[in-house]
Amino acid sequence: MKFVDIHCHILPGVDDGARNEEETREMLKTAYEQGTRTIVATPHYYPNVGESRSYKIRSAYDATVAMAVGIDRNYQICLGAEILYNGQVTADLRAQRVSTLCQTSYVLVEFPGYVDFSYLCRAVQNLRTSGFWPVIAHIERYRVLTGHPERVLQLVDMGARIQTNADAVCGKQGWNTKRFLHRLIRQKLVHVVATDGHGSRHRKPEMKKCADYITRKYGADVAERLCSLNPMRIVKGEYILE
């Protein structure tokens, strides 16, 4: 199985992910050895960041692509962003001041952990009305959703797609979080597993352990859907049903 990681802070020196090109290179090697063949670089995006940061991100992306090609010329690195949602986001997206995922209609969005459910619903509605498909990053972090799969279902019915972090599925974020995520997986309310990788030593871009774990629990078809097929659909801008 060739993994596709749609959430990874692999660009050197642009956020709290890879500190420099050496760490980016190590993260690329780790991901490749794990079986990942496509990575979407998702640097954090905040409003009013200015042109200088956009140039820095583009330069870091070009350097990362060159490093990936040095490992395998078919190693694909795409550009995206992890967007902290606010009222300005849709305008920034329309003006192309922030990247969607691989120039598709999919947008990776995050929220504060204490966000209200009504705010989540309005955000999803605003993005869908503007023609974008919101992918809610690390669903396990929002207190208002933990233990409430019916709320996640409501967001999905509104048009959201749900991403969870690989280490959380395996239990690194605690038993309650793990139990909640497995409930969502059983109900087909998780669409994508990603690493949210941030470094070569801490929060590494490792997919295989989680994919193997999902395979043992739910079968190879579920692991492939969450770790390969659905994320590739995002990369290609294709519709995700479940």
Image (tube, rainbow, N blue to C red):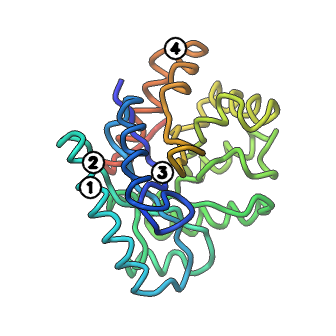
Q: Quadrant of residue 31?
A: top left
| Residue type at tag 4 | Gly
- Residue 157 horizontal/vertical position (percent): 60, 47
- Residue 174 horizontal/vertical position (percent): 79, 34
- Separation of residues labelled 3 and 1 (CA atoms): 14 Å
Label of residue 146 in the image: none
Label 3 element class = strand
- Separation of residues labelled 2 and 1 (CA atoms): 5 Å
* 102 relative to 107 in the view: left or right: left
- Separation of residues labelled 4 and 2 (CA atoms): 31 Å
Residue at the disc numbered 2: 68
Front in this rendered view, residue 136 or 19: 19
Label 1 element class = helix
Front in this rendered view, residue 35 or 180: 35
* 205 relative to 78 in the view: left or right: right
Residue at the disc numbered 4: 219
* 142 relative to 30 in the view: left or right: right
Label 2 element class = helix
Label of residue 8 in the image: 3
| Residue type at tag 1 | Val
